[in-house]
Image: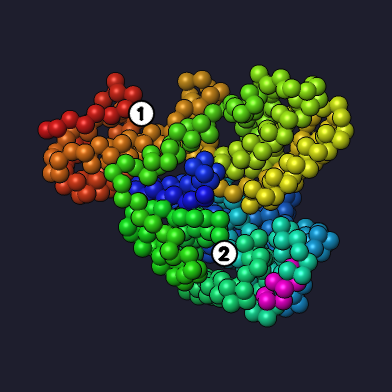
């Protein structure tokens, strides 16, 4: 059984996808943070650097975004009018088009002070600004609209040729001139009516963006994606999902409203969680999240994998551990590697690890076994992971190199900070994560106490500062819910993950 669990709080929304009560994905959305990925801005070009074929664009954020020439749409780069005839994506045409764009001079395309429509393709990371593009995308349930790239792409996971042709023909009949789309895996076997409905919804959003652009000043956000709970419902709701469970009546209403527009046949799956225990506590999500932050992951056989993330890449090491098998050594190694391959796919999803990944499987002498391992790994990625990945053949030393599409921040970056006590060699729980955990515990504790009581809320000084600066509205929301007054008290001797609630 597969479920979507939504834990809503004034300070944070957490969304978990579980299969047979095992956590597969975790998504976090903070009320005080601004998600930039997939947002549209009316930007203003600050600098154009021909030497690196990049323009820096002011979008009203702390850091200017950067736009590389490879992320500029073909028509803008080549000075054409955008009336290209719809055709199906293929690797040769994409490479040729990208090559033509990259040979162009960005200084002849963009000029300092110029205003243009841009979309954020990647969130800012550390000291880097947001990565921008002008090849726009608007994701729906079954298609991703590309309003200024007039070509049709079909997910490689839809392998049936007749089905690919059928879906492409549907879009050809309903796409406006000059627009294109990528057909998602979820579109397989969908009716023309379902496809058209999804497409119309996205085209309406695109027209809204253009209208906002025309009447807005530079550095203005024109459009942002739906909130995190609706994003997960949009991207992951299919026939495999048995239930969508939320602990917030307002969130339940929002999901109902969204599904009424895009997928009314799934409205019955939305349930309100009303037990006294927390939703995530009921399904032991927090315990599984804690394990997902550990470097070592144990395998059922007794083997293990070690996951190390660096700035440049992620390294995964596979060990046999206590597993000795019942056959010869080669058979034992193959079984451990196959089990590790499945677990690695699950961990990449759960930890949201993207970019370059190097996996050190246990060395195998048999070339057939090496081929069998890579084939199984690729097939498992295809079946269980929605994100695009490329896997190279295993080397004689058992090394597999792969890339996985980045989307958002890895779980490690979301929930931990660099530890200054060890000069960045280790990590500790982030103040934000500790604070939110305390707020959840306080909410559960107050549910068991009489309504209308007043308390001293004693916390660590770092938590006190974060609550006072960023989450005081959340304290007010808790007070209003329980008709209580919480007086914040800062105490240095309390550990960051502890608190005390004393009745006045």
Image spot of residue 204 (x, y percent): 52, 75
Secondary structure, magenta segment, majority class: helix
Picture residue at 74% right of the left edge, 50% below the top: 51
- Residue 175 shown in magenta: no
Task: Residue 141: give its label.
Answer: 2
Image spot of residue 56 (x, y percent): 61, 54
Image spot of residue 370 (x, y percent): 82, 34
Compared to residue 332, the image places residue 9 above or below, namely: below
Secondary structure beneath disc 2?
loop
Residue 57 as seen in the image, left or right of residue 274: right
CA gap, disc 2 and disc 1: 39 Å
Task: Residue 497: give its label.
Answer: 1
Circle 2 or circle 1, nearest the eye: 2
Instruction: Name which of mark 2 and mark 1 comes first in the sequence.
Output: 2
Picture residue at 71% right of the left edge, 19% below the top: 324
Secondary structure beneath disc 1?
loop
Q: Nearer the viewer, residue 340 or 456?
A: 340
Q: Is residue 134 visible?
A: no
Q: Is residue 496 visible?
A: yes
**Image quarter (top left, top right, bottom left or bottom right) of the C terminus:** top left
Picture residue at 34% right of the left edge, 42% below the top: 278
The stretch of residues the image draws in magenta is: 164-171
Compared to residue 409, the image places residue 113 above or below, namely: below
Picture residue at 60% right of the left edge, 66% below the top: 142
């Amino acid at each position: 059984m597969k479920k979507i669990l939504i834990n809503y709080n004034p300070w944070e929304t957490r969304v978990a996808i579980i299969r047979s009560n095992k956590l597969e994905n975790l998504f976090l959305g903070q009320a005080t943070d601004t998600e930039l990925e997939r947002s549209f801005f009316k930007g203003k070009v600050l600098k154009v650097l021909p030497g690196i074929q990049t323009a820096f664009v002011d979008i009203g954020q702390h850091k200017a975004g950067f736009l590389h020439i490879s992320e500029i749409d073909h028509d803008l780069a080549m000075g054409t009018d955008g009336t290209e005839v719809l055709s199906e994506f293929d690797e040769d045409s994409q490479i040729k088009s990208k090559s033509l764009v990259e040979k162009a001079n960005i200084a002849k395309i963009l000029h300092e002070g110029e205003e243009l429509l841009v979309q954020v393709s990647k969130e800012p990371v550390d000291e880097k600004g947001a990565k921008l593009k002008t090849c726009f995308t608007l994701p729906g349930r079954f298609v991703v609209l590309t309003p200024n790239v007039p070509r049709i792409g079909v997910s490689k996971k839809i392998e049936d040729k007749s089905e690919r042709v059928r879906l492409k023909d549907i879009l050809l009949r309903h796409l406006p001139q000059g627009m294109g789309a990528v057909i998602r895996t979820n579109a397989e076997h969908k009716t023309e009516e379902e496809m058209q409905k999804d497409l119309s919804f996205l085209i309406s959003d695109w027209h809204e963006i253009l209208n906002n652009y025309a009447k807005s000043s530079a550095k203005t956000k024109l459009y942002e994606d739906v909130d995190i709970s609706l994003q997960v419902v949009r991207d992951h709701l299919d026939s495999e999902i048995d239930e969508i469970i939320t602990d917030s009546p307002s969130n339940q209403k929002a999901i109902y409203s969204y599904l009424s527009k895009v997928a009314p046949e799934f409205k019955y799956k939305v349930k309100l969680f009303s037990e006294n225990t927390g939703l995530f506590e009921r399904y032991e999500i927090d315990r599984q999240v804690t394990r997902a932050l550990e470097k070592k992951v144990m395998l059922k056989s007794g083997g293990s994998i070690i996951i190390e993330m660096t700035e440049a890449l992620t390294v995964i090491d596979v060990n046999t551990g206590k597993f000795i098998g019942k056959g010869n050594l080669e058979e034992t190694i193959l079984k451990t590697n196959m089990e590790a391959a499945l677990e690695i796919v699950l961990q990449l999803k759960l930890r949201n690890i993207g970019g370059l990944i190097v996996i050190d499987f246990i060395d195998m002498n048999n070339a057939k076994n090496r081929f069998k391992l890579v084939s199984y790994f690729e097939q498992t990625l295809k079946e269980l992971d929605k994100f695009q990945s490329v896997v190279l053949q295993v080397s004689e030393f058992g090394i597999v190199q792969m890339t996985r599409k980045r989307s958002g921040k890895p779980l490690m970056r979301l929930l931990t900070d660099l530890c200054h006590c060890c000069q960045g060699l280790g990590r500790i729980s982030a103040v934000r994560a500790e604070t939110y955990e305390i707020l959840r515990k306080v909410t559960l504790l107050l549910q068991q106490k009489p309504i209308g009581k007043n308390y001293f809320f004693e916390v660590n000084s770092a938590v006190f500062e974060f609550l006072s600066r960023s989450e005081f509205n959340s304290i007010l929301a808790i007070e209003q819910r329980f008709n209580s007054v919480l007086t914040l008290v800062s105490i240095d001797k309390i550990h960051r993950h502890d608190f005390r609630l004393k009745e006045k």
